Image: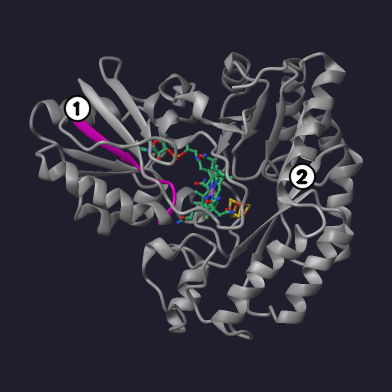
Amino acid sequence: MKFKLIYPRWEKLDRQTRFQLPPHGPVVFAAALPPDVEVEFIDENVQELTIEKDADFIGISMMLTAQVKRGWEIADAYRKLGSKVIFGGIATMLHAEETAAHADAVFIGEAEGRMEQVFADLKNGRLQKIYNYYQNFPPIESVGSARRDILNRELYNYRGVQMVDLVHASRGCRFNCYPCCVNFLGGRQFRPRPYDRVIAEMSAIDNNRLFIVDNSLAQDKDWEIGLFKEMIPLKKKWCCHPIENDDKVLDLAAQAGAWFVYQAIFDSSDFIRDRIKRYHDYGIAVEGSILLGLDYHTEDYIKKLVDFLLAIELDMAEFTILTPFPHTRTFDDLASAGRIFSHDWNDYTCGKVVFQPKLLTPEQLQSLYYYAWDKFYEEEPQNYKMFKMLKKVIDKEKQDGTYKARVR
Ligand code: B12
Ligand code: SF4
């Protein structure tokens, strides 16, 4: 059985340095496929997709809202040729009803242990329109090692320099932040994978640099301590979402190879100043994730926030505009107040204003977004800061003898 799995392209943040990370959802999904399924994977962000009748079954994996319209377009074209199409992934769950209009099957939930049934149904001509496993999670032990062999790994680099391979150590998140849909997806349940599985997967990856893509590692202190202790002997270097604000945890994270974290920065408080300083004290760099357009944001507030980021010597910054993704509290609030003016999902890139801000006009917010990117990278351009981050990892690797002057 030949299965073509497609990851639709989307519009990137227009000020951000261009480089592509390998997708994670599709390769984890591929590990759940029955053994007789031969997978061909196309990531449209880095590869050309030719639409022809060249597979028995088409799968479309969507992570972001900004991917869905392209995903539907691809499906429509394949279905015109008579191919059957199944959709899955995070954005499929968030846009399930709309997606059903373009699909032979819509899969909602996590794939582990469920694909044998789907493929058997296809073979018997009984493919179901909806496979609904919403918040009906498979045992976390059933998550297999991602099928990175289906990627053309040569395509994922930054100016020829080897970047990261992606891996996850847990699913779910116990928090419920305002702009986030993970609560809808995961029901605030934190589900760590067994350490031995995670360590075996990490150590088998032929790359010293990893991105641990878990929502936030700061979920359970004992779990983090256990994970980092197990990781120390691997000598991998890695980035991740937040790590617990605790000296013992940060120290172990650094020993385990923490290179940089993506950390949300929501204000210019002493708490944030201290949070960033503590990462730096442990040799961990920080890429701030800064959301613009909250109800209390004025021009003055945003400009002062950017000055603050420069003053605390944040290593990198990613500015995004508040975006009311479906199934978030942001969406509920802005929709009920009639403040959303674009429902074109292609605008939901996090770089475009799609709602009426409270204390700014949409145009002001849009130009403050560009201001923030330009001001932050005025003295040291993004490529330069990015090379400084890469130098940090190379220095760490040289210290413990894991550096390989390898270019992909
Ligand atoms: C990792 C991650 C990233 C990584 C992506 C790395 C990569 N290349 O994959 C990075 C950090 C780059 C990233 C960036 C962004 N992200 Co992000 N990210 C995530 C995160 C934390 C985890 C996704 C993941 O890998 N999960 C693990 C995999 C294994 O799970 P999965 O994809 O669901 O796959 C399973 C099933 O869905 C199924 N499945 C998957 N595909 C298919 C296909 C078929 C056919 C079938 C049947 C089943 C199936 O099988 C898998 C195994 O069970 C999610 C939050 C979350 N928990 O969902 C946010 C999330 C997806 N991101 C989000 C956003 C908004 C962004 C950004 C746009 C903005 C930002 N700064 O955060 C940027 C992109 C900006 C840009 N530059 O263009 C939002 C999406 C909202 C939306 N509706 O679009 C999420 C949901 C978080 C949130 N804030 O709510 N992100
Ligand atoms: S933003 Fe991060 S920490 Fe907050 S609910 Fe979403 S996944 Fe969890």
For the residue pair 287 and 246, the one nearer the viewer reads as 287
Please give the label number shown on residue 384. 2
Q: On the image, which quarter does residue 303 sit in? A: bottom right
Looking at the image, which residue is at 18% across and 49% down?
76
Q: Is residue 166 left or right of residue 263?
A: left
* Secondary structure under the numbered disc 1 in the rendered image: loop
Quarter of the picture holding the N terminus:
top left
Residue 305 image offset from top left, x and y in percent: 78, 69
Residue 86 image offset from top left, x and y in percent: 24, 40
Mark 1 surroundings within 10 Å by alpha-carbon count, few (fewer than 14), some (14 through 19), many (20 or more): some
* Secondary structure under the numbered disc 2 in the rendered image: helix
Q: How many marks?
A: 2
Mark 2 surroundings within 10 Å by alpha-carbon count, few (fewer than 14), some (14 through 19), many (20 or more): few
Amino acid carrying label 2: it is Tyr
Please give the label number shown on residue 55. 1
Q: Report the Cα–Cα distance between label 2 and label 1.
A: 44 Å
Looking at the image, which residue is at 70% across and 27% down?
227
- Residue 390 against residue 74 in the figure, above or below: above
Q: Is residue 144 visible?
A: no
What residue range appears in magenta?
A: 57-65
Q: On the image, which quarter does residue 162 sit in? A: top right
Whether residue 324 is in magenta: the answer is no
Amino acid carrying label 1: it is Ala
Residue 343 image offset from top left, x and y in percent: 37, 71
Q: On the image, which quarter does residue 385 sit in? A: top right
